[in-house]
Image (cartoon, helix red, strand yellow):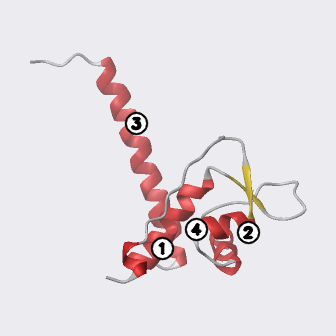
């Protein structure tokens, strides 16, 4: 097994309103700035407004990590990443709604 096969990226959000620079995002996710620029162009992530240099909400880190895995492991292209991530977000949202409904409805045993 190569080093790349055994390497695991870990991402932890410390503050929900914090931001990361383009350089921090690239280092954390192991990608080049050009790749992040393609993600921005496809609408996968969006830089924070009102900054001189690109900064991103720290909550984008897990999304970019997932995009990296989809791209490297499954060969999903950049435009496919946008669709795949949107569908994954929708699934997560639907599961949360289903869990909320399950909590409100009594089970018939």
Q: Earlier in the sequence, mark 1 or mark 2?
A: 2
Secondary structure at numbered mark 2: helix
Q: How crowded is mark 3: few (under 14 residues within 10 Å), some or many (20 or more)?
A: few
- In percent of width and height, residue 88 lies at 42, 56
Decide: is 103 above or below 57.
above
Residue linked to disc 2: 23
Estimate the spatial distance between the alpha carbons at disc 4 and disc 2, rounded to whole Å.
10 Å
- In percent of width and height, residue 71 lies at 47, 76
Q: Are marks 4 and 2 in contact (CB under 8 Å)?
A: no
Residue linked to disc 1: 80
In the image: residue 61, left or right of residue 3:
right
In the image: residue 12, left or right of residue 33:
left
Estimate the spatial distance between the alpha carbons at disc 3 and disc 1, rounded to whole Å.
24 Å
In the image: residue 55, left or right of residue 66:
right
Residue linked to disc 4: 29
Decide: is 79 above or below 65.
below
């Amino acid at each position: 097994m190569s080093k790349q096969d055994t390497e695991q990226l870990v991402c932890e959000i410390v503050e929900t309103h914090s931001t990361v620079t383009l350089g921090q995002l690239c280092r954390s996710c192991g990608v080049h700035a050009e790749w992040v620029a393609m993600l921005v162009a496809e609408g996968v992530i969006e830089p924070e407004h009102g900054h001189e240099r690109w900064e991103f909400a720290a909550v984008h880190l897990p999304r970019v990590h997932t995009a990296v895995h989809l791209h490297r492991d499954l060969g999903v292209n950049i435009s496919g990443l946008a669709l795949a991530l949107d569908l994954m977000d929708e699934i997560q949202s639907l599961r949360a709604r289903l869990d909320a409904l399950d909590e409100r409805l009594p089970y018939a045993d």
